[in-house]
Image (cartoon, helix red, strand yellow):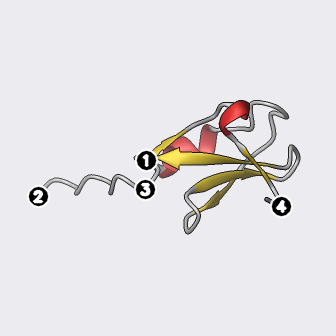
Amino acid sequence: MSPSPLKTSEVDPRLLEVLVCPVTHTPLEYDREAKELISRAAGLAYPIRDGVPVMLPEEARALGD
């Protein structure tokens, strides 16, 4: 029996281990409910679309919005 594929809204946990904020190069927090990767250092939340993190600062939401 092969492992089931990840749901399209889920991010591969191995990918989360290596991703860092493109602005500050600091680790990110995964907010599963909001489907975002959070950079507290930059004050940004990067969206996850169809299971793919969008790591472009211009696509990120400022925290507190």
Query: Please, what secondary structure does the residue beneath circle 2 have?
Result: loop
For label 3, the residue is 10
Disc 2 + disc 1, Cβ < 8 Å:
no
First reached walking from the N terminus: tag 3 or tag 4: 3
Image vertical order of residue 17 relative to residue 33, above or below: above
Q: Residues within 10 Å of mark 3 (few under 14, many from 20)?
A: some
Q: CA distance from mark 2 to mark 4?
A: 45 Å
> What's the amino acid at mark 4?
Gly
Between label 4 and label 1, give the one nearer the viewer.
Answer: 4
Disc 2 + disc 3, Cβ < 8 Å:
no
Q: Residue at x 32, y 57 (%)?
A: 7
Q: Is residue 11 left or right of residue 5?
A: right
First reached walking from the N terminus: tag 2 or tag 3: 2
Query: Please, what secondary structure does the residue beneath circle 3 have?
Result: loop
Quarter of the figure with the N terminus: bottom left
First reached walking from the N terminus: tag 2 or tag 1: 2
Q: Is residue 52 left or right of residue 26?
A: left
Image vertical order of residue 51 relative to residue 18, above or below: below
Q: Position of residue 8 (x, y in %)?
A: 34, 52
The quadrant in which residue 42 appears is top right
Q: CA distance from mark 2 to mark 3?
A: 21 Å
Numbered circles on residues, count: 4
Residue 64, labelled with which disc? 4
> What's the amino acid at mark 1?
Gly
Q: Position of residue 61 (x, y in %)?
A: 72, 48
Between label 3 and label 4, give the one nearer the viewer.
Answer: 4
Between label 2 and label 1, give the one nearer the viewer.
Answer: 1
